[in-house]
Image (cartoon, rainbow, N blue to C red):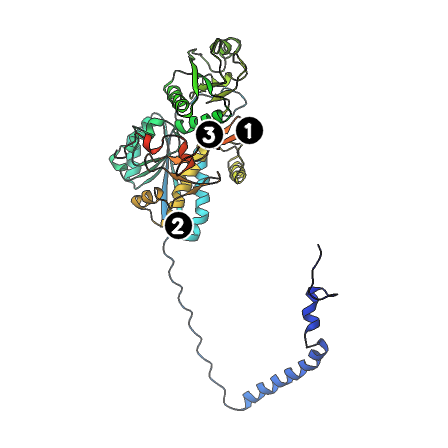
Amino acid sequence: MKVESDMAGHRPWRRPFRSSPIRWRGWAGTFPVLLLGGFVAFSGSISSGAAQPPSAAPQAAAAPAQPAPLQVNILYLSRQYIEPPPLSLTQKIVTDEGIQGARIGVADTNKTGRFLNQNYHLSEMILSLGDDFKAKAKAALDSGQKFIIADLEKPDLLTLADMPEAKDAIIFDVRTSDDSLRQEDCRSNVFHILPSWAMRTDALGQYLVWKKWTRWLLVTGKNPADLGYAAAVKRAAARLGAKIVDERTYTYAAGSRRTDTGHQQVQEQMPLLTQSAPPYDVVVVADESETFGDYLPYRTWDPRPVVGTQGLYAVAWARPFEEYGGTQLQHRFEREVGRIMTERDYSAWLAIRSLGETIIHINSVKPADVRAYLLSDRFGVDGYKGEAMTFRTWDLQLRQPVLLVDPTELISISPQQGFLHPKYLTDSLGYDQPETKCRLNK
């Protein structure tokens, strides 16, 4: 690197010394004179008068008392539901999903909170299926818990939200995507973090329409969650201009998800399930219960991509995503926990961060104040997705970009280019305000 100088032939760091009017040699002669003068002045002050009494040492001012920190108590409430094991032996069974994200979220929030004299504390209540859920939840609410991270399925979530003791609580739903909880079964004290089924299928549908893959073969399971996702697929097709050319239902009931998935199912049932369909561009699978969808890719009758709940799917968070600083969160979680961050971990982390972002700004733990700020134009939480995410006022759903991934790679991020909205592009995903059936008076 060339060093520029405003004095030709000289380096800039030597110029002040050389241009000084006082040379070192001059200082060498001046220094003894200054020293002698100081000694004479000091001697004269001693001999000129009586010794002065020492002045009283000033008393140190008492430091103001530090006020007690603002205590923010958060309850993580979950239940040990019976979940099927993963289909592949390469997938590890995760038993601490969700709670680890909440723990990291509290640790992250306390890093800022300690500078503002705020302290965030997480209590954990993980119930078994045999526990009296209502009694346990009532006891927690009676103890003063007003901020709840609810890792609960729909029946328990509604039980909690409808309890009189929870009327003024702030409940963050970090588990469900059920559209009915954002529509006819919405509650005014429940904020939803994960994308709804409608948001997921709109995100996927936008990409398929952008690719001009507009003919869809829908393959659906028979469980209620499968049917709910399938309904969202049909809605997305209708609003985006795609066409469902045919619908098939998977009805085979395996005795064991691992031992009854051999030659009969993989080599025969999957091709037969998709045989003789009208011309289509993609297979859209609705298998929220993860019964058969993982076996469809590469086994359909016609060589077509598989999308939906398996294949190419829409999520809030996944390991292949590392954009907008996402690598920082991914690596921090893996370092602290020892495994990858799942979507439910991210949802719990984001709920804690949303609450912390609010209380850091308003310095209040009154639920009414927190709710008002969460729904105001001032709120925005950074979730490593390139924009501040906010809550919809009509159904308390967190608006956010949705990732389109396969098991190993980030494929795209919706909203897609060209899908517009007058206020928030992310409101092109899911139920917009004119479409909502939610009435927040429950």
Q: Amino acid at mark 1?
A: Glu
Residue 351 screen position, x and y as percent:
40, 38
Q: Are marks 3 and 1 in contact (CB under 8 Å)?
A: no
Q: Amino acid at mark 3?
A: Val
Of the numbered discs in the image, which one, if any, rests on residue 67? none
Q: Which residue is mark 2?
A: 118
Question: Image point 42% across, 49% down: which residue?
Answer: 113
N-terminal of the two: label 2 or label 3?
2
Packing grade of label 1 (10 A; few <14, some 14-19, many >=20) is: few
Residue 260 screen position, x and y as percent:
48, 11
Residue 109 screen position, x and y as percent:
44, 45
Packing grade of label 2 (10 A; few <14, some 14-19, many >=20) is: many
N-terminal of the two: label 1 or label 2?
2
Depth order, front residue of 390/88: 390
Marks 2/3: CA distance?
33 Å
Which secondary structure, mark 1? loop
* Camera-side mark, 1 or 2: 1
Depth order, front residue of 436/333: 436
Q: Are marks 2 and 3 in contact (CB under 8 Å)?
A: no
Q: Is residue 28 left or right of residue 59?
A: right
Depth order, front residue of 19/332: 19
Marks 1/2: CA distance?
39 Å
Marks 3/1: CA distance?
12 Å
Residue sitting farthest toward the bottom: 48
Q: Which residue is mark 1?
A: 409
Residue 212 screen position, x and y as percent:
50, 23
Of the numbered discs in the image, which one, if any, rests on residue 315? 3
Q: Specify whether residue 189 is in view.
A: yes
Q: Amino acid at mark 2?
A: Gln
Which secondary structure, mark 3? strand
Q: Specify whether residue 97 is in view.
A: no
